[in-house]
Amino acid sequence: MLTVPLYAQRQPVTAEEEAYNFLLGAICAGRYRKGDRLVAEDIAAEIGTSRMPVREAFRRLDAQGLVTLRPNRGAVVSGLDIEEMSEVFEMRSALEGLAIRVAVTKVTERHLTLLERLLDDMDDCRDDAAQWVVRHRVFHEYLCSIAERPRLMKQIIALYSLTEAPMRLWIEHGEKPLSDREEHDRLLDALRTRDADLAERVIREHIEGTLPALTQFLQTEQ
């Protein structure tokens, strides 16, 4: 069973990949937050590599919008403002809606059984906000991966990487309940019906319904 998000499953094969995965994981986990300065020398020493792979990782993260490169000053964690967060959720809604529409034609009982287990994993973490956010991401990424559309999946993963840190902050300090079991069960019911229109509508309502409370919380934090 999946226990980590898809972005974290592939083993690093180069020093640059190792540095990139380290930084991506740290940003998603909230270890580095918006405005934090990332010093290549310090990060290189921590993970046991040279500065060059870390700087290359900075460039990749800059291209994704996760950090901002500053000439001769390293990088700074970017974060998202409210307008940018809204845009990302709009994109997630559209892309995950497409993914689940395709997944309807491919889903099997084995997929549904694993998705149920992933929901059980989320329920087991109701009192651990950090783990709940990770397992929530695992559920959504696995659900979308059923579509077997690698390029689409790459875009969805990138969007999750932009939102995981603020989502974790919200779950840990806001009033959002740690279990959306009823909403997620509706997604599985829609898959079982093989009704593509219904499945797409349910997942888009689920994603878009998260945004108002999340943005309200983030406005109080700014």
Image (tube, rainbow, N blue to C red):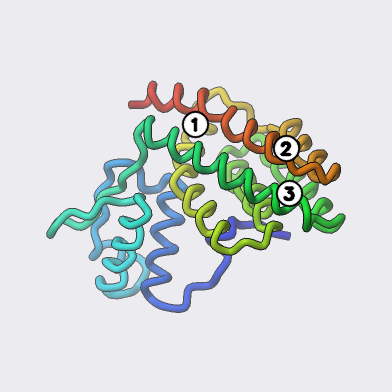
Classify mark 1: helix, strand or loop.
helix
Q: Which image quarter holds the C terminus? A: top left
What percent of the width, then of the height, locates residue 216?
45, 22
Residue tagged by mark 1?
170
- Which of the marked residues, 3 or 2, is nearer the chain's N terminus? 3
Classify mark 3: helix, strand or loop.
helix
Residue tagged by mark 2?
184
Task: Please determine whether, in this image, residue 91 is positioned above or below residue 43.
Answer: above
- Which of the marked residues, 1 or 2, is nearer the chain's N terminus? 1
Q: Residue at x 55, y 69 (%)?
A: 10
Q: Which image quarter holds the N terminus? A: bottom right
Q: Amino acid at mark 1?
A: Trp
Q: Amino acid at mark 3?
A: Leu
Query: Are the residues tagged 3 and 1 within 8 Å (C-beta)?
Result: no
The Cα–Cα distance between marks 1 and 2, rounded to whole angstroms, is 19 Å
What percent of the width, then of the height, locates residue 30?
43, 45
Extreme front residue here?
197
Residue tagged by mark 3?
118
Extreme left residue here?
72
Task: Please determine whether, in this image, residue 217 is positioned above or below residue 33.
Answer: above
Query: Left or right: where does residue 63 sit relative to residue 213?
Result: left
Q: Residue at x 41, y 78 (%)?
A: 14
The Cα–Cα distance between marks 3 and 1, rounded to whole angstroms, is 21 Å
Q: Nearer the viewer, residue 218 or 178?
A: 218
Q: Amino acid at mark 2?
A: His
